[in-house]
Image (cartoon, rainbow, N blue to C red):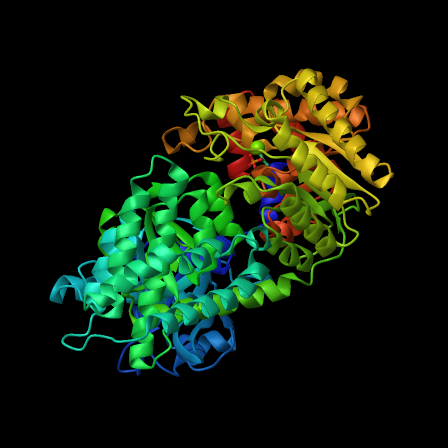
Amino acid sequence: MSATNTRSRAPAWAVDDASIMTLASGALELSGFLERAARSIAEAAGADACAIFLTVPSGRELIRTAAHGLKANHAGSTSVALGQGLIGRVSQGSRVLQAVCGDAAARSAPDLAELRGRHFGAVAAAPIEHAGTRVGVVALYQRTAARFGRGQLELLREVGVRLDMAIALVNAAAGANKAQAASGPRHAVAGMYRGEGVSHGHAFGVARVLSRAPAARVLELRRLSEPDGNPAVGALTEILDRTAAQLEREQGALAERLPEAAAMIFESHLMMLRDRAFVSRIQEGRDAGMELGRAIAEAAADFIRIFERSEHEYVRERARDIEDLALRLIRNVDAADSGADQEGEMHVIVARELLPSDILWIAQRDVKGIVLVSGGSTAHVSLLVRSLGIPMVIVSAGELLQVVDGTSMLVDGMGGLVLVDPPEAAIRAFERRGQLAQQARTQSRARHEVTTTRDGCRIRLMANINLLSEVPHALELRAEGIGLYRTELLYLMRPDLPDEADQEAVYRRLLRAVGKLPVTFRTLDAGGDKVLAYFNSAAEANPALGLRSTRLTLKHPEVFDRQLRAILRASSEREEVRIMFPMIGSLDEWRLARERFCLCARQVMDEHGEGHNVRLGMMVELPAVVDLMEDFATEASFFSIGTNDFIQYTLGVDRTNDRVSEYYCPHHPAVLRGLQRVVAAACRRNVPVSVCGEMAHDPRYIPFFIGIGVRELSVDPNYLPAVQETVERFTLSEAENYARSLLKQATIGEVATRLFNG
Ligand code: PEP
Ligand code: MG
């Protein structure tokens, strides 16, 4: 197979929600969007021209609003009466119709000036539908007088179904921006902001700005919510009890969602509620005549100031907990006062930065979406947010931090959009898109149980997971096991090291959830951009080249051992479990890590009297190991290639630094040839090798990996259906030819030409 053949089966522009909405995201007004859409539709369908007609507000005619490939002198079809001619009939029915030059349909269609003037030989049209009504027509034209193929008609029908959301979105966003410009915003910050979507899905909720100055916030809230001349007079103990009961209730629900943090959730809140000093400080305020909400705010603000002055970051971060508890108490006072239950507000969090510890805070609340202003987050915070399924967009619009709490906000993680105070139409468009995405998810469950290339070569598809909450989704999508469990996320969201029993409990739960399927534990991969403040806090000039990963755990054997023992204990009743060490740079490091494992295995065996059932492997992430693979192969049971780091270290490019992102090239010839040598050595020695970095889900690299001998890919669960579809498109020899053709190229440009242009 050549690259051309692989790509020619996939349309240049797939008609799914993602592509339509991405197209819409680039447009600030409707006509610009529709022009681009017309071009993309024509290209995707392999047609010579495309036109989009929209119904005018009077509802009696359609106007050609955008076109690609039609000449200006095709004036006959710029407006069409409803019900007349082919376009007019399509606009009133729900079917796709076509006409070929000279046939009866063409003769009875007065609107088809293009056909009569012999500019084109055939036309096909589909209705654009919105909530059951037809709002326009999309038409394709081709020069030859031949009927359109089934695939083209199907694509046209799909476009018609999906285009309406994008139209509604662009209209809504343009409307919001126009209204803001004309009459001034309802809020100081309003309209649409474009950024980068890092976690998909969409969310609608009320804004809550996460500040790093909680004391001021608590007082501010109190001032805003204090009823004039009618101070609230709830009883303190009643509010404390009610809040404690509420916290305990939520704790149960959240332990399900985030089992990794089950023991910690709300611990600090409950402790604070029972803290005598805090309670008496509130009481003092009451005794001095303050209404209850104000007394809580004043007491909390005092405590926050004390915590914020601490020299320990961990203590300073606890100030956020007090802020949070105070806000909860105050809301409960207000709710008691008004008789309303104010729980259950759905928040969109707006923050300048997010720390890994914030994730726990976020998981505890009903956070629907996140807007990160100016990108203050590590790659692993993004990973965690994705694992929790919360849509997130990074925007560089500082004014969003000024948005008033409670303002409604829509976050589109797929298109990278943030809409402040969005119009009703935009909310509806997104809701509909959510329903379609849900439908697509349901359909994608019906994948084949096993994955093979077109000619039957078996490829195992595994899932990468970061949190236990992802396991059901991975199984639903028929992952054949867990190819990478990033255990460090369990460490990242905690304020201190998880103890052995906590880890064992989480690992046990994971193993129970996956049943008999294989699981690959990666030992702690901290350091670099995954900083554990409580563990490896020394600031480093070059963290990516600093004390990280297995080097870090080897320096702290007590931490390493705790984790290894926890995995061994949790898996003692399983037939097999895999453990792999990240970022191994030499046989010496590998052997040191293996020694620690053997030591722990002996300790656990002494307790239980049973041998272990662990296969020990390593990640291939450093170019240093490429020439040593045959040596590793005599000692390791399996290899897993972490392409994210392999690219970073082969090319000397920080994978998290936007300023050098253009140099982060998976298609660099040195990367591809390095990967080929790794896989070839593993195959020669019969050691299984899988790929678990981001390249493993990219349709451009999947045939490459299979062509060089990889038979197992491990990807984010969401990619499983698409990866299976890609694998099923080619034969093994096509993949081998494709890989050979890429490996022959000596420049990035030449590889890119083959990869991107077919
Ligand atoms: C990788 O480096 O490709 C990998 C899978 O590990 P992580 O992204 O967690 O560093
Ligand atoms: Mg890595």
Q: Which residue is drawn at 79% across and 43% down?
A: 457
- Residue 339 position in % (x across, y down): 33, 82
Picture layout, residue 582 above or below residue 203 = above
**Would residue 558 appear left or right of 666 to someone viewing this image?**
right
- Residue 349 position in % (x across, y down): 36, 56
245 or 688, nearer to the observer: 245
555 or 637, nearer to the observer: 555
Q: Residue at x 30, y 75 (%)?
A: 234
- Residue 302 position in % (x across, y down): 26, 51
Picture layout, residue 316 above or below residue 555 = below
- Residue 238 position in % (x across, y down): 38, 74
**Would residue 681 appear left or right of 34 to someone viewing this image?**
right
Q: Residue at x 70, y 41 (%)?
A: 566
Q: Quadrant of residue 561?
A: top right
Q: In which quarter of the image is the N terminus?
A: top right
437 or 307, nearer to the observer: 307
**Would residue 676 appear left or right of 256 to someone viewing this image?**
right
Picture layout, residue 291 above or below residue 656 = below
**Would residue 260 appear left or right of 660 to someone viewing this image?**
right
Q: Quadrant of residue 721?
A: bottom right
Q: Which residue is drawn at 63% across and 65% down?
A: 443
The answer to whether residue 37 is visible is no
The answer to whether residue 508 is visible is yes
Q: Quadrant of the C terminus?
A: top right
In this rendering, the count of numbered labels is 0
Ligand 2 is found in which quarter of the picture? Answer: top right
Picture layout, residue 390 above or below residue 226 = above
Q: Quadrant of residue 715?
A: top right
